Amino acid sequence: MIGRLNHVAIAVPDLDAAAAQYRNTLGAEVGAPQDEPDHGVTVVFITLPNTKIELLHPLGEGSPIQAFLDRNPAGGIHHMCFEVEDIHAARDALLASGARVLGGGEPRIGAHGKPVLFLHPKDFNGCLIELEQL
Amino acid sequence: MIGRLNHVAIAVPDLDAAAAQYRNTLGAEVGAPQDEPDHGVTVVFITLPNTKIELLHPLGEGSPIQAFLDRNPAGGIHHMCFEVEDIHAARDALLASGARVLGGGEPRIGAHGKPVLFLHPKDFNGCLIELEQL
């Protein structure tokens, strides 16, 4: 079911500092910050040869990553995203296996404009997993 | 400096259950468990089209991931590993930038038989980063 690792998302307390660190200290290809008001985050994309890192910072009130940063003030790896071919088929197979899909189980349009789902970390070794249909 | 994302490592409390979940529920290509006594872990490699996931479980006394599992009993993302061409050059550049290299700063031979270094999570947004020279 799962295909490529689309990205690893890192919640960071200081987006400019983190972007500068990946650009200058780690020598990676780092994009400009992009506000995603529908998702409550500002994102910086880091392009690696085989996948992406996404730096996430809260945007506005009620950001979905604020609670994570409150628990982890230094930041941390927030989720990883796997690509799937058919998100409804993936959702149905996961539900049939007993896994919980967050947010009611209907795919939403994610930050890349593609349908996404999030799986419950308690069902997946403490890891928040996003599935994205390409 | 950093190249490909070589792998994302997940510490899991039940290696067999986690391997079965990635194989059966998530439909990924999952290898057999491999004991790495020199590193205090048993590892299951999951091959994705563009990178790997490594499931880690403590092996023996004093495993470097036991404390992580004590803090996170359900498991969690433990580290991510970026490839570098020259690990000594990477180390020197990181030290010059003020970043801390764990374990005295000398590369060790990692679980893949290649020289590796780990960077201090407090210097990298709460993320434990491994660098591996291919």
Image: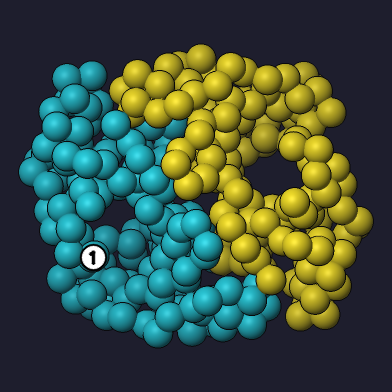
Chain colours: A yellow, B cyan
The image shows residue A121 at horizontal and vertical percentages of 65, 59
Q: Is residue B102 left or right of residue A18?
A: left
The image shows residue B129 at horizontal and vertical percentages of 34, 43
* Element carrying mark 1: loop
The image shows residue A110 at horizontal and vertical percentages of 79, 41
Residue at 79% across, 32% down: A39
Q: In which image quadrant can residue B31 be found? A: bottom left
Q: In this view, does B104 lie to the left or right of A21?
A: left
Quarter occupied by the N terminus of chain A: bottom right
Q: In which image quadrant can residue B111 be found? A: bottom left
Q: Residue A106, relative to residue B61: is it above or below? A: above
The foreground one among A60 and A56 is: A56
Question: Callout 1: residue from which chain?
Answer: B
The residue pinned by badge 1 equals B111
Q: Which amino acid does label 1 sit on?
A: Ala
Q: Residue A85, relative to residue B19: is it above or below? A: above
Residue at 22% across, 20% down: B98
Residue at 64% across, 56% down: A82
- Is residue B22 at least partly visible in the picture? no
Q: Residue B11, relative to residue A36: is it above or below? A: below
The foreground one among A128 and A19 is: A19
Label 1: few (<14), some or many (≥20) within 10 Å?
some
Residue at 80% across, 44% down: A114
The image shows residue A103 at horizontal and vertical percentages of 86, 52
Q: Residue B67, relative to residue A114: is it above or below? A: below
